[in-house]
Image (tube, grey):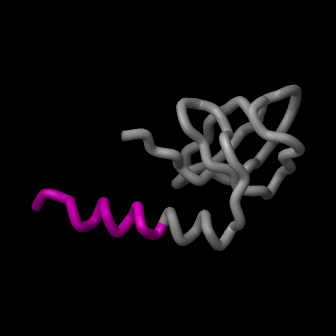
Amino acid sequence: MCLGVPAKILETGDGAAVVEVGGVRREISVMLIDDVSVGEWVIIHAGFAIEKLSEEAAEQTLALFREIADATEVH
């Protein structure tokens, strides 16, 4: 199974971007999508932005990931 994770664009430049997910920053490639800007949300997979999405959709997806993580946490 493949997992795409929503991330917020913090910086852009020359086919790459710095994104943040859960407080972690990472450089990714944005060569597969057009016209990304700082502040936009993208889905990342294997170090590549593969699709843009709305902030609302990103927040909903991240909330679901947190719920899944909480539900599967071993006590």
Q: Quadrant of the C terminus?
A: bottom left
Q: Position of residue 25 (x, y in %)?
A: 61, 41
* Of the pair 66 and 42, the residue shown nearer to us: 42
Toward which corner of the image does residue 33 lie, by quadrant? top right
Residue sitting at x 53%, y 49%? 5
* Of the pair 13 and 25, the residue shown nearer to us: 13
Judge from the rendering whether residue 69 lies leftward or rightward of residue 31; answer left or right. Answer: left
Q: Residue furthest top?
A: 14
Q: Position of residue 49 (x, y in %)?
A: 67, 39
Judge from the rendering whether residue 12 lies leftward or rightward of residue 29; answer left or right. Answer: right
Q: Residue furthest front?
A: 1
Please say if 40 is above or below 1. Answer: below
Residue sitting at x 51%, y 64%? 61
Please say if 53 is above or below 51. Answer: below
Q: Position of residue 51 (x, y in %)?
A: 69, 48
Asked if the stretch drawn in magenta spans residue 71, the answer is yes
Judge from the rendering whether residue 12 lies leftward or rightward of residue 21; answer left or right. Answer: right
Toward which corner of the image does residue 46 lie, by quadrant? top right
Q: Quadrant of the N terminus?
A: top left
Residue sitting at x 41%, y 61%? 65
Asked if the stretch drawn in magenta spans residue 74, the answer is yes
Q: Main secondary structure of the magenta part?
A: helix
Q: Position of residue 6 (x, y in %)?
A: 59, 53
Q: How many numbered callouts? A: 0
Please say if 59 is above or below 43. Answer: below
Residue sitting at x 27%, y 65%? 70
**What segment is highlighted magenta in the picture?**
63-75
Toward which corner of the image does residue 27 lie, by quadrant? top right
Please say if 16 is above or below 56. Answer: above
